Image (spheres, helix red, strand yellow):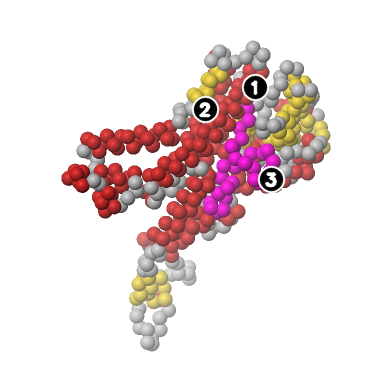
Amino acid sequence: MFDGLKRLWGRIVSMFNYTTLKNIIGKDVALSQTMIDAINEWKRMLVGNADWCDDDTVESLKLEEGICREFADSALVEMEAKILNNDKMDKVLQKSLSDINKKLQIGLALGAIVFRPLGPDKAEYVAADKFIPISFDDSGVPNDIAFLVVKCIGENDYYIRVERHYFTNGNLTIENKCYHSQSKNDIGQRCNLEEVAEWANLQPGPIVYIGMTEMDFGYYQNPIENKVDGSSCGVSVYESAKGLIKKADVQAARLDWEYDSGERAIHVDQRALKTKGGKTFLPRLKKRLYKGMNLEDGKDKELYKEYSPAMRDEAFRRGLEEYKREIEFNVGLAYGDLSDAQEVDKTATEVLASKTRKYNRVTAIQEKLEECLNGFVNALAFYNGSYTSGVEFTCEFNDSILADEESERQQDRQDVSMGVMSLVEYRMKWYNEDEATAKSKIPEQNRVME
């Protein structure tokens, strides 16, 4: 049903502006033009096409992808979610969870994601660029939402199905509308669902499901305050670090240029170079040995000059690592998640504080994810006729971020007591001291061990 959408575009919100979406729904929607623009920007950043990466000068470091991957990996490590009293539904849940890591990464990048059943035995993830939140309840979950599905038949016939979910007198209501257009950027005119074979059996509705008092999907939203437009729409996990990510990408471009411009070359007279097709080429890397010069008899009679500038790469690398650490602080990661762990000039207390910061952010993500999974399981029960009978669902997460830190430190203490690790090494690692400082801090009676 949704293959046409996935083949044609990766984004719905980029197809239509706010005015078009308002006309489709027939009322104001919570998704403002500002949010539409923001979602499109986050998506471009995620795939390496940020506005500052629009030429050959600056390439994306894909830090956005790294941020989302690190949060998803940390949140989902050893997660155990299970439906206890319905094996059939649990199989659907487990199959759906097989893709949750990569889908959560998209949700983290774009601010929100819907996890919804497609009948009793199938499910799909719908990222924020493929649905329209119309309104939200007090808890921040959409209570009126539209999913847009696009189908192309032939070369120029586009069909857009608007599947809207909302409440009527406290009961779930679903309706479908279909539009036909000869342009992918225009909603076109209303038409019948039967014009698309795959939609012929769908009921236009609205159909009211008496007794279903909640939405038929799970909704995940990043635990981040929306400062983009102040609405209840979700915000990207890297929104607050956009400027720093740009600086890091530009800094990396400076580092690349330093390496490119610093290639050794031997300047020789133009006549010493061979040409091909009337042109002289400047080779790169190990083949870049000669660069031609037009030298005439006169004061300067040197036929060979070496070009070997001093490299400033270390300064550029330090700057790049500092930007990465600022990004880590901004988004809530620990030092070393993006930056080089060997370059982290922090005390053990500061490192532990950064671990705690990450733990708090990951815990908040897990809480939102558990709410989403609860909503999905209830929706799955609805489509399996078990909504009123109830299902037993459990979801547990592993708190390994801080536990691993303390376990590693305890192991190092044991290594010191066994004599396989010196006190100097221990202080250098956990107190971030150089060797001389570490030695000076060791009690006199223990220095014989060093």
Disc 2 or 1, which lies upstream in sequence? 2
Q: Can residue 227 be found in the magenta stretch?
A: yes
Residue 389 picture location, percent across and down: 64, 12
| Residue at 45 percent of width and 43 percent of height | 354
Residue 65 numbered tag: none
Give the amino acid type for the residue marked by disc 1 in the picture.
Ala
In the rendered image, which residue does mark 1 sit on?
379
Q: Are marks 2 and 1 in contact (CB under 8 Å)?
A: no
Res. 273 in view = no
User: In the structure shown, which secondary structural element does the residue marked by tag 2 occupy?
Assistant: loop
The residue most toward the left is 448
Q: Left of 259 or right of it: where is 234?
A: right
Res. 425 in view = yes
The answer to whether residue 323 is above or below residue 160 is below
Disc 1 or 3, which lies upstream in sequence? 3
In the rendered image, which residue does mark 3 sit on?
229
The answer to whether residue 123 is above or below residue 18 is above
Q: CA distance from mark 3 to mark 2?
A: 34 Å
Magenta range: 218-246
| Residue at 41 percent of width and 73 percent of height | 292
In the rendered image, which residue does mark 2 sit on?
98
Give the amino acid type for the residue marked by disc 2 in the picture.
Ser
Foreground of the two, 411 or 65 = 411
Q: Left of 215 or right of it: where is 318?
A: left
